Amino acid sequence: MATAKEQKNSLVKQDRANIWHHISAYNEKNPPMIVESGEGAWITDHQGNRYLDAMSGLWCVNVGYGREELAKAAYEQMKRMSYAPMTQSHEPAIELAMKLNEMLGDDYKIFYSNSGSDANEVAFKLARQYHQQNGEPSRFKFISRYRAYHGSSMGALSATGQALRKYKYEPLVPGFCM
């Protein structure tokens, strides 16, 4: 029977052999962090070390880990209907759109997307489409900030102002200026 230490070392070995981590250093000196659990704003790795997750799980766990009421709500919704494409509508989408409009204090049309990268891609396309339809096809450039991060898709990466994240993927989408 393997000891706890051997099991933990095996996890690191299997991780290195099977997973390609996004924006991570690959060398023997930097073993991957293997997270076991999370509670509130804290995560615990496979060695029992506890960390304050100041990035909210890369921005997608901003309400914290281990929220039983959210797990229960997700479970109930998945029993009822686990997925519906946004080419159709469904009651939870309508309810959330109404709530967002109430919070925003105006009459907006809510567009749902899967991620920040995806939302940025849609925004880029909408801006370009707007100028195309208004007879201004030469207006296609975007200005971004130095050190800004917009995502990992090609358009979002093109808008990102962090050269070290970009140069290995060039040529990028044209029209983005820092």
Image: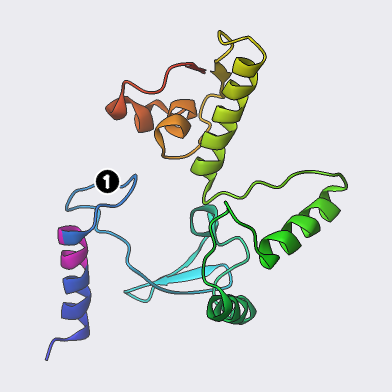
Q: Left or right: where does residue 124 sit relative to residue 163?
A: right
Residue sitting nearer the eye, 49 or 80: 80
Q: With respect to residue 96, does 8 lie above or below?
A: below
Which residue in the rendered view is the most extreme toward the left? 1
Q: Give me the residue at 48% from left, 30% from top.
A: 160
Q: Give me the residue at 85% from left, 54% from top.
A: 102
Q: How is the image coloured?
A: rainbow
Q: With respect to residue 87, does 81 lie above or below?
A: below
Q: Left or right: where does residue 1 sit relative to residue 132?
A: left
Q: Amino acid at mark 1?
A: Ala
Q: Is residue 83 magenta?
A: no
The residue identified by callout 1 is 25
Residue sitting nearer the eye, 12 or 133: 133
Report x, y in % for residue 10. 16, 73
Report x, y in % for residue 156. 47, 33
Q: Left or right: where does residue 101 sit relative to residue 176?
A: right
Provide the residue span drawn in magenta: 12-17
Residue sitting nearer the eye, 67 or 74: 74
- Kindly indicate the quadrant of the structure image that contains residue 163: top left
- Kindly indicate the quadrant of the structure image that contains residue 99: bottom right
Asked whether residue 54 is in view, the answer is no
Q: Give me the residue at 56% from left, 41% from top.
A: 119
